């Protein structure tokens, strides 16, 4: 592994105007693009595809191949950590479908010429994260790019009958979230370099900005693999919470399943609410972009004890945050805001 102690003076985040999953094309713009090109229809060759977190193709009666691609600009300056976050985020789209076996990743990496020295550490972070998910690096593609970015094309397998989409959520289901929100606010606080504004940021929250950022990094580098395994055969639908934010991702689930969603609880990383208010990210309204966020699981009431027991047994964080209704759209009215401290949870 490359030497992490090597001097790196360049800040990766300074080379991009948008960071992490906030660089994602907006939901309405993406929908318009797909309609314009005629890519909104299902394909007979696929079990599912466009409009879902990943695509799935049946290989045999007992085996389906799930494939996805995801990459983004730096959300953190440390190259190794950037690689780890990028890998977890890319694999999460496969895990959201329930595909966790035979994981491999084709790395996608782009860097400005002056940042090519960071490539070994970014790649090492991706490789270590994929290895931790019982996957392998199978190749990749690297280019020179004015904006740095990293991620990968990920594939995994699963029995076809175990796969999840966003289409089968049913009225009466309970909604679970497997990571707290707030990564955009936490990383925004870390990126502040102006001394005067740094003081304003530090005064906005009682917790250390560094501690908030460290906790956000720990969540972003926690794979969703264990959560995906726990939800097999109990969840009716799933997605992961990324660039569209909680409301945006739940809106996709509501539209695809033709249901309504009521959100009554928002677990957030302790200290990020005040940072969000300062930066205007809309965290308490469920609007802030998340990077490498948790799985959103729709689960019948009869299966909630099984899910919770499995998540507890795998030491996976979770909160029941709402329910599926017969209505339409997403309703978020005065939800309970629950600050989550990884430090307190571990003690």
Image: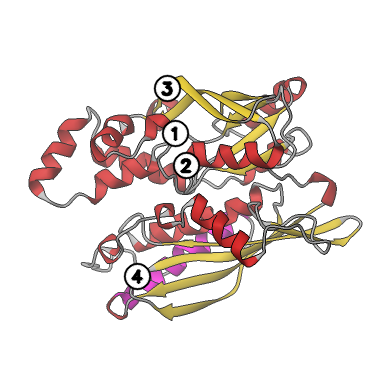
Q: Position of residue 113 (x, y in %)?
A: 31, 81
Q: Position of residue 198 (x, y in %)?
A: 14, 43
Q: Position of residue 297 (x, y in %)?
A: 64, 35
| Residue that sits furthest to the left in the current view | 196
| First of labels 2, 3 by sequence position | 2
Q: CA distance from mark 3 to mark 1?
A: 13 Å
Per the image, the residue denoted by label 1 is: 286
- Residue appearing at x 49%, y 56% in the figure: 29
The reply to whether the C-beta atoms of the residues labelled 4 and 2 are less than 8 Å apart is no
Where on the picture, by quarter, is residue 170?
A: top right
Magenta stretch in the rendered image: 115-133
Q: Is residue 128 magenta?
A: yes
Q: Is residue 298 magenta?
A: no
- Residue appearing at x 42%, y 22% in the figure: 338
- Residue appearing at x 80%, y 45% in the figure: 162
The quadrant of the rendering that contains the N terminus is bottom left
Q: Which numbered mark, 2 or 3, is in the foreground of this view?
A: 2
Circle 4 residues within 10 Å: few <14, some 14–19, many ≥20: some
| First of labels 4, 3 by sequence position | 4
Circle 1 residues within 10 Å: few <14, some 14–19, many ≥20: many
Q: Is residue 170 above or below residue 295?
A: above
Where on the picture, by quarter, is residue 140?
A: bottom right
Per the image, the residue denoted by label 2 is: 245
Please tell me whether mark 2 sits on a helix, a strand or a loop: helix
Q: Position of residue 256 (x, y in %)?
A: 68, 42
Q: Is residue 290 above or below residue 202?
A: below
The reply to whether the C-beta atoms of the residues labelled 2 and 3 are less than 8 Å apart is no
């Amino acid at each position: 592994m490359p030497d992490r102690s090597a001097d790196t003076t360049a800040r990766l985040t300074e080379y991009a105007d948008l960071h992490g999953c906030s660089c994602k094309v907006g939901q309405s713009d993406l929908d318009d693009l797909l309609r314009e090109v005629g890519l909104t229809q299902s394909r007979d060759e696929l079990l599912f595809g466009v409009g879902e977190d990943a695509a799935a193709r049946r290989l045999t009666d007992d085996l389906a191949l799930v494939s996805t691609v995801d990459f983004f600009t730096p959300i953190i300056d440390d190259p190794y950590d950037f690689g780890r976050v990028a890998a977890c985020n890319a694999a999460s789209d496969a895990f959201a479908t329930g595909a966790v076996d035979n994981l491999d990743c084709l790395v996608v990496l782009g860097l400005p010429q002056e940042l090519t020295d960071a490539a070994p550490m970014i790649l090492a972070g991706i490789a270590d994260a994929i290895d931790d998910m019982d996957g392998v690096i199978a190749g990749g593609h690297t280019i020179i790019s004015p904006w740095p970015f990293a991620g990968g094309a990920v594939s995994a397998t699963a029995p076809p009958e175990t796969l999840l989409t966003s289409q089968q959520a049913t009225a009466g289901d309970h909604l679970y979230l497997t990571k707290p929100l707030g990564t955009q606010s936490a990383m925004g606080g870390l990126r502040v370099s102006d001394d005067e504004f740094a003081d304003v940021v530090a005064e906005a929250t009682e917790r250390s900005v560094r501690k908030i950022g460290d906790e956000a990094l720990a969540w972003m580098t926690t794979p969703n693999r264990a959560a995906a395994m726990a939800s097999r055969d109990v969840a009716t639908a799933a997605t992961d919470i990324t660039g569209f934010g909680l409301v945006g991702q739940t809106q996709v689930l509501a539209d695809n399943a033709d249901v309504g969603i009521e959100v009554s609880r928002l677990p957030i990383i302790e200290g990020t609410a005040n940072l969000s208010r300062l930066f205007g990210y809309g965290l308490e309204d469920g609007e802030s972009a998340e990077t490498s966020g948790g799985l959103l699981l729709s689960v019948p009431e009869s299966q909630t004890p099984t899910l919770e027991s499995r998540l507890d047994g795998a030491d996976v964080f979770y909160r029941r945050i709402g329910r599926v209704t017969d209505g339409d759209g997403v309703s978020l009215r005065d939800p309970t805001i629950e600050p989550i401290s990884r430090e307190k949870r571990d003690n």
